[in-house]
Every structure is written in C-alpha cells, then in structure tokens.
Amino acid sequence: MLPHAHRMVDAEDFRSTIRRGSRAGNAMVVVHCRTDVDSDERLVGFVVPKREIPRATGRNRVRRQLRHLMRARVGALPPGARVVVRVHAEALGHDSTELGRALDNALTRAWDRSRRSRP
C-alpha cells in the first residue's frame, strides 16, 4: 500500500498536475507529472472515472493495484514530484505485472517529456 504521506489529496494538486504537467499514456493508463520546486515530498494521485469503469468494485480493484505498484516506484521519483495516474477501462482485468509494465512505460515517457520541456 502506498504510504499516506505520498498520497495526493488536495484538489489543487490534482488540477495543477493535470493542467500544467507533462502527459504520456497507453491503452491502460495516462500519467500526468510535474515537479513542485517548493516541496521535497513526492505525491501520487489516482483518477478512476466511473465512465471508464462503471462498477465500484472494479474501480477499487484497479486503484488498489496501482497504489501497490506505485509504492515500489515512489522512491525513484524526483524530489517534489507530483504524479496523477488516470485509468482507462482497458486496465480492468489485467494482472499487476501487465499493469506495472503499462505504468512504467507511461511514467518513463511522461518524465522524459517533462525533462525536454524544461530549459
């Protein structure tokens, strides 16, 4: 489980990360990321839309899988990192290995785009 200290709960953090952050995705997830220079804490948030996965049990299952996967990856994020993972319906029904590969792919591409856009 992702430690509580790394969970993004503030709506403004979600909003600014999605609007101003770099984005990359695939069939299962879309990752938005940015770096907050005023903070050293790494925060991760998840968006699992009801439109994509209508049943609450499915949304909760995918969210739990992603929280567990991000627990292992949060230490590798740069200080001040803000990451929002948005889920697509394709993620439901896949095991954690496949979901982890999709997450790693999207995270790597999003951070590469973030680095290229900075001077």
Image (spheres, rainbow, N blue to C red):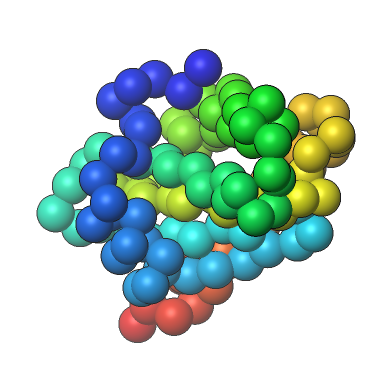
Please state which of residues 117 and 19 is positioned toward the viewer in this rendering: 19
Please state which of residues 99 and 36 is positioned toward the viewer in this rendering: 99
Q: Position of residue 63 (x, y in %)?
A: 59, 32
Q: Which residue is drawn at 35% across and 55% down?
A: 14
In this view of the protein, can residue 72 be seen by the observer?
no
Count the labels in the image: 0
In this view of the protein, can residue 4 be seen by the observer?
yes
Q: Residue at x 33, y 22 (%)?
A: 4
Q: Position of residue 70 (x, y in %)?
A: 55, 32
Q: In this view, does 82 lie to the left or right of 51?
A: left
Q: Where is residue 40 in the image (x, y as percent from the top left)?
A: 22, 42
Q: Which residue is drawn at 85% across and 34% down?
A: 93
Dividing the picture into quadrants, the one containing residue 43 is top left
92, above or below 117, in the image: above
32, above or below 54, in the image: below
Q: Position of residue 106 (x, y in %)?
A: 66, 57
- For the C terminus, the image quarter is bottom left
Q: In this view, does 95 lie to the left or right of 56?
A: right
Dividing the picture into quadrants, the one containing residue 117 is bottom left
